[in-house]
Amino acid sequence: MKLVSYFFILSLITLFLVIANLLFGAVSVPLDSIVDAFWDHTNPNHFTIHEYRFPRIIIALLVGAMMALAGALVQGVIRNPLASPDILGVSHGAGLAAVIYMTFFPDAAIEWLPLVALLGSFLAAIILWRLCGQHSTTVKLAITGVALAALYASCVDFLMLVKPLEINNALLWLTGSLWGRGWTQLSLLLPWLVLIPAALWLAKPLNLIHLGDEHATSLGTHTNTVRLAALAIAVGLTASCVAICGPIGFLGLVAPHLTRKLVGGRHQALLPATMLVGAILLLLADLAARTIDPPIELPAGIMTAIIGAPYFLWLLLRSK
Amino acid sequence: MSLSTQQLSVGYHQKAIVKHIDLNLPEGKIIALLGPNGCGKSTLLKALARLLTPMQGEVQWQGKALHKIPSKQLARQIALLPQTQPIPEGIKVKDLVAYGRSPYTGFWGRTNQADQEIIHQVMQETGISELAEQLVSELSGGQRQRVWLAMTLAQDTPYLLLDEPTTYMDLNHQVELMHLLRRLNQQGKTIITVLHDINQAARYCDHLIVMKEGHIIQQGLPTDVLTRELLKSVFSLEAQIHQDPIAKTPMCVVE
């Protein structure tokens, strides 16, 4: 199938899921009143659509796309489908930093959260790098990353036991959920969108890095610069998403891998396509999480883990 | 003397494998680097392709140190086919060959008409035109080696460096490759290749460089370089030198 048709179909699915997410939930909104409900303040569904579902859908779109993009960058640089920011512990590093911040500075402004998360994820990346060294195998990286992620998660548990009152806020946020995310969170996410064109700028050198350092250098690529830039962008994307939704597991792992099967390994196609696939997966996860047993909501992160964890195991077993 | 080395020492982990080499690589020739395993021939080749940073001395391109030349500009002058190739996932043959045009394309890697013509031509030259739509990961080893060669040729450089290009090939493909190198040389390319097979080198190359323990022992025309004494001292081999009945080049026959 032609590349264009893949993009067309993926965009169509995305659009379909956006509409489905607007329609369904604890309250069903009829299709023909959606536009009216968005603009008209007197419409009975105005609050549901305008304040609740619409910003949440945009956040799901962006977070899904950004997490998938971060995963594709990391997989491109490390040259292994097992790698992704959550497997490497970067997401949970961001999560831990954010929980510490919320626990000890409960009155501090939410605006700082993305930067705190960024600090946490950079620290997590550096710790992993120091532990494994530059030339370690990807399996070693993955196992160390998973262990570190578990360590960060248990630090969060510890804080929850010691500071049960302060942590209440954090708990809601930590499960990797889109619940209660609205215009405020969306506005926090927007500045980070500049990382998307920055990532796309790396498509060509990432192709060459995929051929190994000898070919990449011989073709005129500064391999270390590209690697560093790609990882820094991936860490930034992850941190900004975690700051808004908490760690949503396996999205950065599964989306790029699925996309590679669809459109191949050229990053000019892979990077944009994986953003669509990531958005689709998170929209789907959130739709399921909201509609399985309304009005009770499951965190979307649990839905992605249900699909993602077996997928990860399958990949791990398959890689010799 | 476009490519040369000055007092070049290079190696791995602070250990020099190539030691204080002064070398001028003659332009417009097919040059073979020969020597026993561990003599430093591959290391020297990698230094010429700026994959390794010199510990001492430098490699010069037209009198200028390699690391002072912008890497994209250098990539239009010197191309390298390493000894082992990775198996990229989800990449079609035509896309891989097109990657060879990277030093010429813009940031998004889009190829123009001229690029496409070169890609088409090198795929014909290497006999992989009919594989264009296949995935590189689904090819046989010999086919894959030719695809990588095509990518390197698409780089369209006056200098072509190859590290034991015939090692994993069937004999007929080895011969094909050496003939292709000849044709490329006649089109004006300077070719520098590490070879394992002394007779192959003597038959197809204009200039042999023989190395041992990081030093250059002997270099020049095959007829001048290949002697009983050299084979004995470098390869510890008792052999006679005869004339190849077809190519009239020297040929060593082990006693």
Image: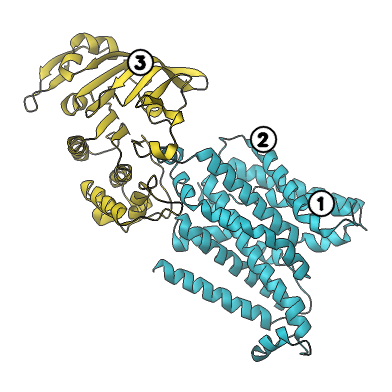
Chain colours: A cyan, B yellow
Residue A162 on image: x %, y %: 91, 51
Q: Nearer the viewer, residue B239 or A41?
A: A41
Reading the image, the residue beneath label 1 is A156
Distance of mark 1 from mark 3, alpha carbons?
61 Å
Same-chain check, marks 2 and 1: yes
> Measured along the vertical axis of the image, is residue A301 above or below residue A231?
below
- Estimate how packed mark 1 is, as few (under 14), some (14 to 19) or many (20 or more) residues with alpha carbons within 10 Å: many
Q: Is residue A126 left or right of A101 when viewed as pictured?
A: left
Between circles 3 and 2, the one closer to the viewer is 3
Distance of mark 3 from mark 2, alpha carbons?
39 Å
Q: Amino acid at mark 3?
A: Asp
Reading the image, the residue beneath label 2 is A130
Q: Nearer the viewer, residue A104 or A138?
A: A104
Q: Amino acid at mark 1?
A: Val
Mark number for residue B22? 3
Residue at 80% across / 53% down in the picture?
A98
Q: Is residue B78 left or right of A26 when viewed as pictured?
A: left
Chain letter of the residue carrying label 2 = A
Q: How many marks?
A: 3
| Element carrying mark 3 | strand
Proximity of marks 3 and 2: CB atoms separated by less than 8 Å:
no
Between circles 1 and 3, the one closer to the viewer is 3
Chain letter of the residue carrying label 3 = B
